[in-house]
Amino acid sequence: MIVGVSTLTKTIEKTDVREDTGTSDDTPKFFHYVKKDQIIDSAVNGRMVVALCGETFPVTKQAKPGSPVCPDCERIYRGLRKK
């Protein structure tokens, strides 16, 4: 038996100042424009795709109507020549 030993635990609080850019259900903040053949290949094989804005990522979610679109992808897409 040890007598005369005292232990003190202190909690130091630290404020988290990071900006939350995601959502709680793992939905991306923006959806991007990507070539159709890249979407299928990524969904099946897990390969990375390159969006019009240059962002690279694996396809994990499908955009629903009204989903927020990346402003850079939208600007580039509107600037493409329609065939």
Image: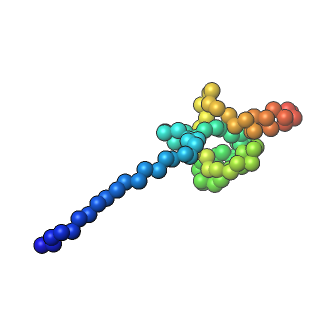
Residue 28, quarter of picture: top right
Q: Which residue: 15% across, 72% down?
A: 2
Q: Which residue: 68% across, 34% down?
A: 69
Residue 74 x/y as whole percent = 75, 34
In the image, farthest residue toward the bottom = 1
The image shows residue 80, relative to residue 17, as above or below, that is: above
Name the image quarter holding the N terminus.
bottom left
Q: Nearer the viewer, residue 3 or 29?
A: 3
Name the image quarter holding the C terminus.
top right
The image shows residue 50, relative to residue 62, as above or below, that is: below
Residue 62 x/y as whole percent = 59, 38
Q: Is residue 25 left or right of residue 30?
A: left
Q: Which residue: 80% across, 38% down?
A: 76
In the image, farthest residue toward the top = 66
Q: Which residue: 74% across, 48% down?
A: 54
Q: Is residue 61 visible?
A: no
Q: Is residue 72 visible?
A: yes
